[in-house]
Structure formats: structure tokens, C-alpha cells
Amino acid sequence: MKNFVALNREELAKQHYVRKASTSSDYFFSIYQQELKGYEERFGNDFNIIFYGNEDVETDYYSIPFLFVKDVLIPQNLYQKQKRWAGDIKNHVINFRVSKVKRNISGFYSLPFSLKKNQVQISVKDSNDYAIENAKREIKVRVKQSLFRNRVLNNFNGTCCVSGITENDLLVASHIVPWSEKIETRLNPSNGLCLSVLYDKLFDKGYFTLDNDYKVVITSRISELSSKTKARLLEIQGKFISSTRNNEISQLCLEFHRQNIFESFKL
């Protein structure tokens, strides 16, 4: 799919400063002093600086609250002839070349936007760390409920891949590698299973996992569990999950789950 920011640049630019970064040279970017000044005059601190890269990758962009970098975007850090700040982004670290300031911006990567009015955007009205983290948490909740959920449910045709349940309000897009562990897998449908509410919780806590053939493997500690939980797990023991439509489930993600989450539950 096409890059969301590239497709909606004109609309996003009404509220945010949008720039194209060069993917051929370490996500090189420029921020022009006069253009930035215009956004400050209109919105104060309440806007984002958005960098987007590969136009063929839907979520290849960063949406950075202006306040997160405002202290760096000062006259003494300009390239004076062009009246611009410049830098690059490597491994989710932004580097401002004149000032040599570096900051981790991984939390601002691939965050979804709503083009509707009065929807949550990444904007921070206060410069303290609490305000920034609170804004990021609000967006993360919306990611799980929207983009990732839609992709995963579509991948499994709206059906729990182990129980066959199809009631939409009982289905969860379950991360194999948890949201907090890896930036690059957060929105990837290959890192998701469509599970009913109960099996989502059992998978998330490590009561069962999948082997390399996508077959259910239940905990060896089953004798410690209640009869009802045993019954639910035995129902799916050795069962193959349903086939995916578009994206094959990642073997690397499953390996992570087996090594780090499976049988990690505490009773």
C-alpha cells in the first residue's frame, strides 16, 4: 500500500509540518526556518513535524511533537546559508547535524492519523515527559484497536484461528511478539493471530503457543490448572490454526513467543 502521509500530505500539512526524507541517504531531512515559523505562528507548540520515507510503504513515517525537538531548532543550530536545520534518522535515532544532538524517536514511528476533526493526534501542549508519554500511550491504544486489528482479522477472514468463533466483538488481534518488545513488528499482520477473547488471554500469558507447523502446543504445567482451563486448552491441543489469507505468520515471531512467553505465567 502507498505511504499514508504521502497520500494525505496536503490534508496533514494544514495542521502539521510535513517533510519528505531521503531513503537513499539514511533518511536525510531538512527543516526550513521560515516554514517552521509559520506553523509556530498558527499553532504555537501544538503541531507535529512529520517525516515520511518510502512512498510504497504505508507506515514508513515519523510524527514527532514539535515540543520534543523545539529546543534543538534554534538559530545557532541552522545551516546559515540555507536557513535550515538538517540531519538524518538511523535505527530510530534522529541526528541533528550542526548541533550533534541525537534523540530516540522510536515511539513516534508508524503512528496512525485520523483525518477527522477532534480525533487524537500526536501533539503535546506541555513540555514535560509525562505529557509526551501520555500522548504516546493514547495513540498506542488506538493502533491496537484500528489498523493492526483490521489487518489481522482480515488475514484470518474474521475467524478465531483456533476455535472458529466469528462474532466480531469477541475477537482480538493478538500480538505474538508484544507491542512493547519490537518496533518493527507492531503493525505487521505476520505478528498477529485472530483469537477469541479467552484464547487471546491464554496465548498472551503463555498457556499455549504454536510450533513451526502452526500447531497448538499447550503448557506442560497443565496439571496445575483448574478443570475449566484444562478443558479449554485440551480442546485445541495439537490443532493446526486456520490458514491465513494474505500474510503468513512469522516463524521468528513464533520463536520469540516460545522462548520468552510460553509457560511464563504465574499462578
Image (spheres, helix red, strand yellow):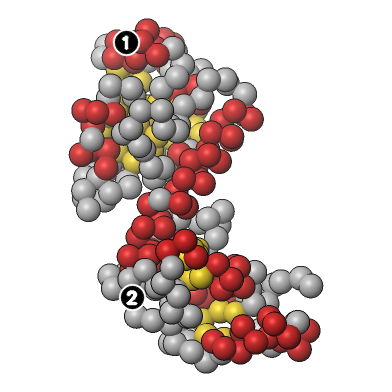
Quarter location, residue 245: bottom left
Q: Residue at x 29, y 29 (%)?
A: 12
Mark 2 vs mark 1, foreground winner is 2
Q: Residues within 10 Å of mark 2 (few under 14, many from 20)?
A: some
Residue found at x 33% / y 32%: 116
Which element type, helix, strand or loop, lies under badge 1?
helix
Question: 208 or 102, which is in the foreground?
Answer: 208
Q: Secondary structure at mark 2?
A: loop
Q: Is residue 80 above or below residue 19?
A: above
Residue occupying the far top of the picture: 41
The image position of residue 3, as x and y in percent, is 25, 45
Relative depth, front residue between 1 and 20: 1
The amino acid marked with disc number 1 is Gly
Percent across and percent down for residue 260 are: 62, 70
Q: Is residue 151 left or right of residue 136?
A: left
104 in relation to 174, above or below: above
At label 2, which amino acid type do we have? Thr
- For the point 41% across and 28% down, the residue is 118
Above-or-below relation of 267 to 88:
below
The answer to whether residue 21 of the structure is visible from this angle is no
Q: Which residue is mark 2?
A: 244
Answer whether residue 147 is visible to the viewer in this image.
yes
Q: Earlier in the sequence, mark 2 or mark 1?
A: 1
The picture places residue 138, in percent across and down from the top left corner, at 53, 39
In three-dimensional space, the C-alpha distance between marks 2 and 1, rounded to whole angstroms, equals 48 Å
For disc 1, the marked residue is: 38
Give the image location of residue 66, x and y in percent: 44, 23
Query: Residue 182: which disc?
Result: none
Report whether 143 appears left or right of 51: right
